[in-house]
Image (cartoon, rainbow, N blue to C red):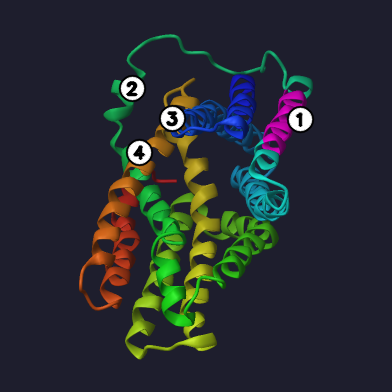
Amino acid sequence: MLAGCVLRVAGFAWLGYAEQTWTVIGAVLLIGFAAALFSPAVESEVARQAVIREEEGHGFRTGVLALLSAAGQAGAFIGPLLGALLLAVDFRTVCLAGAAVFVLVLAGHIWLMPQHIPGRVRTRQRGGTRVLLRNRSFLALCCAYGTYLLAYNQLYLALPDEVRRATGSQAALSWLFALSSLLVVCAQLPLTRWAGDRLGLRRSMIAGLLLIAAGLGVVAAALPAGWTGAAGLLPAAGYVVLLTLGQMLVVPAARAWVPDLAENGRIGLYTGALSSVSGLIVLIGSSVTGSLLDLDLPPAVPWLILAAVPALAVAILPSCSER
């Protein structure tokens, strides 16, 4: 966590003073590498502590992970607003402000994070990756989670085209993004409590993926009507709302599932692998989606194909866990 903070501070400072293409690329890669250190470490320790709290009778583990998701979305909502204000000054100011934020994050972690975590199992044996790649249940979870991320990625790939088709510009996108973030901030915790009481991990994943498929299907069903203007934005808004509701079920459940499927002492490895494997699915799936959007197909076809992906992913979820 601390190394990730230090590298991110360096990456943002470097980006602020980068003046050539290769220096910009280098700074961005450093920021990404910092995230690869920081995020799995944070998420794996949060998941481990969530399991401990659950075992001590303090409620379902998904509640802690839902709090992490809600906090992340609050940052995703506030960050771009602050960034837009800082961009009125210049880009360097934005980058240096980002560096300053992570100086504060670093200081907070140094102050609050214990050097030794009681009950934590350290594993130094090699071969963890080979065992992971033979863990079919975990890989099935990664694939299912990847279909959610692919659907989420359409906020930046297919949705802008749909908003432009309906209104002639992409101005409404910011309002749709704000709607998604506010839904998570306001509804994530109560929805997770309800899902923990009624559904459990497996059924939460199923319900979330089906909601996401329904959101993509709403756009596909409405496209033949050719609505424009305010009415044309309704299917896009429906997609955003259903996607966000599905996200609020899928993300805490998937992260809560990882400790059950990981080797003892290797939650960090499995948490990072969840991001890497699902990210690879997004990379491949987005390339295919972009090709579909470029082809001379009926507009509803790419959205129908996208809707089928999370719906079909439900079939592999029973192999992930019986929980």
Dot 3 and dot 2 residues touching (CB under 8 Å): no
The residue under label 4 is 277
Tell me the SS state at disc 4. helix
Q: Residues within 10 Å of mark 2 (few under 14, many from 20)?
A: few
Q: Would you place residue 134 above or below residue 73 in this image?
A: above
User: Which residue, as the protein is rendered here, is positioned at the far right?
Assistant: 111
Front in this rendered view, residue 86 or 36: 86
Q: How far is disc 3 from disc 1 in space, using C-alphas?
A: 28 Å
| Residue type, label 2 | Thr
Specify whether 248 is left or right of 299: right
| Residue type, label 3 | Trp
Q: How far is disc 3 from disc 2 in space, using C-alphas?
A: 32 Å
Magenta stretch bounds: 96-109
At 29% across and 77% down in the image, what residue appears?
299
User: Which residue, as the protein is rendered here, is positioned at the far left?
Assistant: 296
- Earlier-in-chain disc, 3 versus 2: 3
Specify whether 236 is left or right of 289: right
Tell me the SS state at disc 1. helix
